[in-house]
Image (cartoon, rainbow, N blue to C red):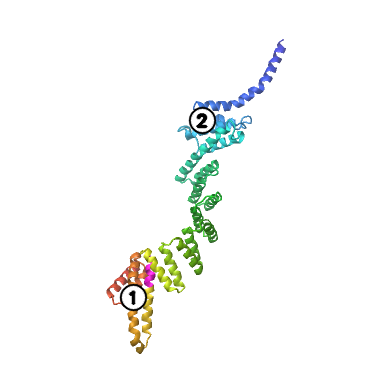
Amino acid sequence: MKKTFLTLAAAATLATGAPLMVSAQTSAVTNAILNQRTGLLDKARVDIDKAIVNEKTSGKAKTWFTRGQIYEGMLESPIYGKQLQPGEGVQKAYESYSKTIELDTKDGEFGKQAVPRLDGLYGRAFNDAVNSYNAKDYDKAIGSYKLASQIKPQDTTAVLYSAYAYEAKQDFAGAKANYNQLLGMNYKSAAVYNRLLQIARQQNDNAEASKVLQQALAAYPNNKNFMLEDLNASLAGGKGEDAIAKINKTIAADPTNSNLYAVRGSLYDTQKKTDLAVADYRKAVELDPKNFDAQFNLGVYNYNKAADAYTKASKMDLKTYQVSGRKLEAEGKKYFEAAIPYFERALELQPNDRNTLTSLKKIYFRLGRTADSERLQARMDALDKK
């Protein structure tokens, strides 16, 4: 009888062995839930971290959902939150809820609860990124921005701010990748093209700058900044006629921009189209009396007209001079007098500009204003001593 009893006891143990083992394996999840409910999140964390590596519980949506709740709870706790590394809580919660949905789908018991919780993590990740950025820890900021992007792949804000963080750490390749990612997401912003253009310039990559500029113009054909950039590129390349066509288009888009008229006037000057140049300089001054270039160039125009008249008079023989020389000199004097207000205004705008000082000094001298001429010479001598 004793031997039979032992055999039956052994059989009973064998029969109940599997359920006891499963109970031991699922107890980690149960303990985690109990500790979470009683506020012992540190213990709950230990239990759930064991459960996710156990082959019997790691494939269950409940396990991962519980893990997400625990880490999210730690994030909200002023006590347990200190036990987490920066960004760790959001990362672990994100992994957990994502795994929950993967295992349970968005319509399952735990999956449908995980969806709104996952969305709610976006703000946490973004705030972590902002805090890291403000602390100048750009690598951590980028990591958190990327996590925010993973949580909401369709969102462009985190991608944009990630680009800013890359720029802050002088990682232009990373910044360009993010800006281009935004363009690929159909993000509508001229600022993105501006940043790509500036990065290309910082890297002295003229080919890339030209490529970006053309893309920008294709997307924003009437953007004044891009039109000006394109105009400057033509000017730098010595493409005068091309530049005139572009500046005409830019003026049509921005008709009150004084600088555009001043630039076009300079282009006409180089083409010996003096009347058109003077008309543009006058329009530039009309729009903005503080436009130094236009004021100076109008002074130069009148100075040159005066100089031409005096030069012609000086080359005349006595007989010709007696007939028309004095008339030419009077004309020259009139042009010198006309140049003075433009040069004086230019000098007010840029008091140390040597070209203006020299030109005005010569005019004063030629018109007999010796004291004014000497005054300007003294200013120039003082500048030389600095």
| Of the two numbered discs 2 and 1 in the rendering, the one whose residue sits closer to the viewer | 1
- Pinpoint residue 302: horizontal percent, then vertical percent: 37, 74
- What residue occupies the far top of the structure in this picture? 1
Q: Which residue is mark 1?
A: 336
Q: Nearer the viewer, residue 331 or 16?
A: 331
Residue type pointed to by label 2? Asp
Q: Which residue is mark 2?
A: 42
Task: Relative to 95, say whether 244 is above or below.
Answer: below
- What residue occupies the far left of the structure in this picture? 371
Element type at marker 1?
Answer: helix
292 part of magenta stretch: yes
Q: Residues within 10 Å of mark 1 (few under 14, many from 20)?
A: many
Q: Nearer the viewer, residue 347 or 114?
A: 114
Q: Nearer the viewer, residue 83 or 254?
A: 254
Task: Relative to 248, say whether 55 is above or below.
Answer: above
Is 111 left or right of 366, judged from the image as shown?
right
Q: Magenta segment range?
A: 291-300
Q: Earlier in the sequence, mark 2 or mark 1?
A: 2
Is 263 left or right of 384, judged from the image as shown?
right
Q: Residues within 10 Å of mark 2 (few under 14, many from 20)?
A: some
> How many numbered marks appear?
2
Q: Quadrant of residue 325?
A: bottom left
Residue type pointed to by label 1? Phe
- Pinpoint residue 316: horizontal percent, then vertical percent: 37, 86
Residue 294: mark: none
- Pinpoint residue 354: horizontal percent, then vertical percent: 36, 69
Task: Relative to 229, say whether 3 is above or below.
Answer: above
Q: Quadrant of the C terminus?
A: bottom left
The overriding secondary structure of the stretch rendered in magenta is: helix
199 part of magenta stretch: no
Element type at marker 2?
Answer: helix
- Pinpoint residue 206: horizontal percent, then vertical percent: 53, 61
